[in-house]
Amino acid sequence: MRKKEMVAMLLAGGQGSRLGILTADVAKPAVTFGGKYKIIDFPLSNCINSGVDTVGVLTQYQPLKLNAHIGIGIPWDLDRNIGGVTVLPPYEKSENTEWYTGTANAIYQNIKFMESYNPDYVLILSGDHIYKMDYEVMLDYHKANKADVTIAAMPVPMEEASRFGVVVADSEHRIQEFQEKPEHPKSNLASMGIYIFSWPALREALIKLKDQPNCDFGMHVIPHIFNQGKRVFAYEYTGYWKDVGTLKSYWEANMELIDIIPEFNLYEEFWKIYTKNDVILPQYISREASIEKSIIGEGCDICGKVSNSVISPNVIIEEGAEVNDSIIMQGTVIKKGTKIDKAIIAEGVTIGENCNIGVGEYADSTFSQKVYNCELAVIGDDTVIPDNVTVGRNVVISGKTEAVDYPEGKLSSGGYIVKAGEI
């Protein structure tokens, strides 16, 4: 039997519906971040930097781009004969075939994968957070406490604690109580959704709860283990951690990367973030171009003005075009004279000449106020916007649009154009 001290199970099957059109055709962990990375690069890089060389990646929703990105794990040094990275989609079984119906149910359906390594410990991770963490230090803490479960938790402002699952711990950090999004929190220690389980405790709980509908770690597995009187501890983390689950938080996290002294540093030698690197030509910056405080990816052709923005590889910004406070993803073309302010523009978009994107006053979304609730103009993959149109704030556009889609050449703030079949 192949013995591993700890295996990681990385939950990467979520849609990330609050990212709206950005996740219409791609799982949230495969969304671009910081110009050249995908969100899933961060927990994968954390694993290899922490000495965790066996990772199961559980996929479900729109896995095509995610699977292609992970491949056999070469960028993260996870192409191993024993261990390495393994993509684990739902699969047909002899009986009771089903999709993953909850975080713990997904892990239960892959219990044989974990058993094949006979681990002492199992690390449970989410594939959609931006952070750096040494899981080996957390494992040492788990061992020192002879814990059955260790939950990574971070202090949050007390007024925000009701948004999170909260843990109440004693002076030795042993957990005494759980509160799931409490109206009146007793603690400001919020669970980060990162867990280390001693394998016997996890295995017993998964089997015991296998018939629990939508079985979830926070709601079912950890309370089950806790109620048995087992040792459950909080591991307090004080570094940078960002849930980029909304359009606003996703935009803010990208904008933080280009601060003079960024709170989250992508350039540290001792804790590198690895990703799949395509062979791309160098970027070209013309004499007429102006770039201020921005990230510019390889293969870009910049002839216009870029300020306070994150530009992915192979983006073309033509002469006279201006991009401010925006995220522009790979392969997008912004034509002459177009001005863009506070936008998230996905991959392969073409924006015509002399357009104005992100102008006017904010208005509530007529498409989805739950998802689209900030100033950003959000434009989905492979969208085409014709010449000479004006687009307001807090809008969503997706599909190959034409001049007729913009009455009087405008899409007002809060409006939307989503072609059939695009979402």
Image: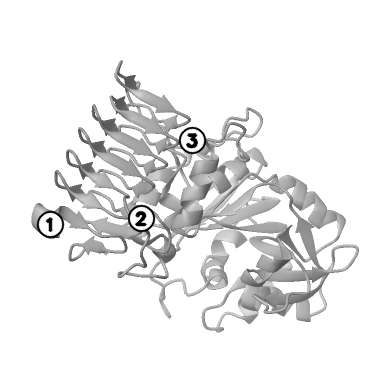
Residue occupying image coordinates x 34% and y 67%: 365
Query: Measured from the top left, where is residue 330 in percent x and y?
Result: 32, 39
* Marker disc for residue 22: 2
| In-front residue for pair 96/106 | 106
Query: Label 2's element?
Result: helix
> Which amino acid, mark 3?
Pro
Q: Residue furthest right?
A: 171
Q: Which residue carries the number 1 mark?
A: 408
**Comes first in the chain, label 2 or label 3:** 2
Q: How many marks?
A: 3
Q: Which residue carries the number 3 mark?
A: 75
Q: Is residue 13 above or below residue 354?
A: below
Residue occupying image coordinates x 24% and y 38%: 338
Q: Do we see residue 422 in this rendering?
A: no
| In-front residue for pair 93/213 | 213
**Comes first in the chain, label 3 or label 1:** 3
Distance from disc 2 to disc 1, alpha carbons, whole Å, reads 27 Å
> Which amino acid, mark 1?
Glu
| In-front residue for pair 223/1 | 223
Would you say 196 lies left or right of 367 here?
A: right
> Which amino acid, mark 2?
Leu
> Which part of the image, by quadrant, shows the C terminus?
bottom left
- Scheme of image coloration: one colour
| Eye-nearest disc, 2 or 1 | 1
Residue occupying image coordinates x 39% and y 43%: 327
Q: Is residue 161 above or below residue 279?
A: below
Query: Measured from the top left, where is residue 127 in percent x and y?
Result: 52, 55
Q: Residue furthest top?
A: 287
